[in-house]
Image (tube, rainbow, N blue to C red):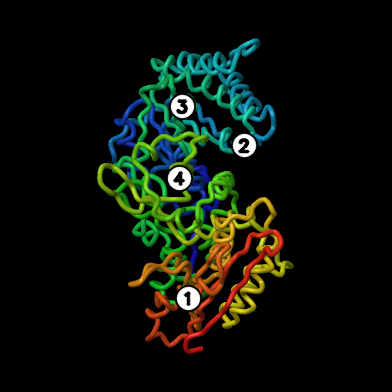
Amino acid sequence: MDQLRYPVGMQTFSKIIEEGYVYVDKTQYIKPLLSQGQFIFLSRPRRFGKSLLLSTLEAYFEGRRDLFKGLAADSDGLDWTPSPVLHFDFNAENYSLENGLEMLLNGFFGRLEKKYDISSQGLSVSQRFRNIIEAAYQKTGRQVVILIDEYDKPLLDIEEDKKLYEKNQRILKSFFGNLKSMDRYIRFAFITGVARFSKVSIFSDLNNLDDISLEDAYADICGWNEKELVDNFAPGIRTLADKRKEDFDTTLKELRDYYDGYLFTEEGSRLYNPYSILKALKKMRIDPYWFDSGTPTFLARRIKNMKIFPPDINGKICSREELIAVGLNDRNPIPLMFQTGYLTIGKLLEDDFYELRFPNREVEKGFYQQLLPLYVPDVRDPFSPFHFYLFQKDLSEGRPEDFMKRLATLLKNIPYDDHYESTYRAVTYLIAVLSGTPALAEHHGYNGRSDLEVFTSRFIYVFEFKYNRSVSEAMDQIHDRDYAGRYTLDKRPVYLIAANYNSDKDNRGLEYKIASVNA
């Protein structure tokens, strides 16, 4: 029987330890971090354990050794003498408000000024922060520890509001400028976020900031590798397997396919998303929890506006330099997709170039679910005739005619000014993938590559699409290049579907023809 307590959404180390929740030990990183440098930056995706890491560091620097009993840090020969800790959490504010960032900082500073009995009247953000650092040092006689969580949220949340974005950028630059000028009072500073922005000049004054995001030594500092998962959560996985009427290894494979796959250096482990795993084991159901908790949508809009074919996102190549530091306004959205967790390292190529890919099914499916409503009505509406389930049912029950008729009707909902071949191809591919069926885009064969192949347990579908051409040309290509030949020995019926989208305003719409092999 699973008796584990799952700390879903919990980010306070002391609460997890004191109340008996499962804690995956990451305290072995404290000692190397202390010798790493004075100012450290770590980029990891949202909901990946950064806040818990900072809370763990806070407990250490406060000298709370009782919380670390039995953990790696307890036997690492560390200095447990308390230091004053200034912990700034940028998660908990609505930055769409004009003064959201100022209100957050005023709250932080007000509490600290009261604690250290100092005045803030007439002072700027920069001056107040500087006074707090100095007062904490003078009143305790010890250098200050500064922990800053999700520093970039005031930018990511309002990326499309240029005026507010630039205002928040200026405030953050002023805030962070104190770290270098006050370094004699600072023992250690650790900053986390989704991205390290190179072109917004926030860190321009902090030239000794040590970015450990892509260093092998810290590859597993957040997230859980499979050994950590099994060692800590085997009873929960076993209970989930029993509920699904599967054996342990089958359920573990499903968890791996859905939540594993993040890789931050070529020498690191494949990592699971902690938030999604905890939700799945607590609820006893494998679902896309990471996206349900809210993710930034501006990257999906960029992919759509740049007319990038969705399956082409997998396999994109970026240099190490591009992945380390990006700008929100960069034309290429792929590096920021890596830092925000949409993409991860697939493999290392020559000369410090990486091939990127979706880390797992949860992220791929979730991203596509964000992307599709940018083209057509939301197909997640349970009352819609275009709901995912209905498309899935058409394919799983061998009704390609109904699938194509539903698709043709859906495409009529595309706004008149968005009729491009990229739109048509993207919608068709996204519908097939989100219908819950395995799909391969541009599948390479011995005599060419098909546009799309979709597989269900009972049927196979081979698609060829044209734009302002003809259905006959598309079907001839399927036959001439023998796209279905690779399934000759497969017992499932194969449907060949040729389609053409005509963008002419007098005859706009999808036309199609269906043929079958062994059906």
Residue 144 in picture, x, y percent from top left:
44, 22
Residue type beneath disc 4: Ile
> Disc 4 or 3, which lies upstream in sequence?
3
> Disc 3 or 1, which lies upstream in sequence?
3
- How far is mark 4 from mark 3, CA to CA? 31 Å
Residue 108 as seen in the image, left or right of residue 351: right
Neighbour class for label 2 at 10 Å: few (<14), some, many (≥20)? Answer: few
- How far is mark 2 from mark 1, CA to CA? 46 Å
Residue type beneath disc 3: Ile
Which residue: 51% across, 84% down?
516
Q: Badge 1 is on which residue?
A: 476
Q: Badge 3 is on which residue?
A: 146
- How far is mark 1 from mark 4, CA to CA? 36 Å
Residue 186 in picture, x, y percent from top left:
41, 20
Q: Badge 4 is on which residue?
A: 334
Q: Badge 2 is on which residue?
A: 160
Give residue 370's quadrant in the image. Answer: bottom right
Near-viewer residue (393 or 34): 393
Asked which secondary structure carries label 2, the reply is loop
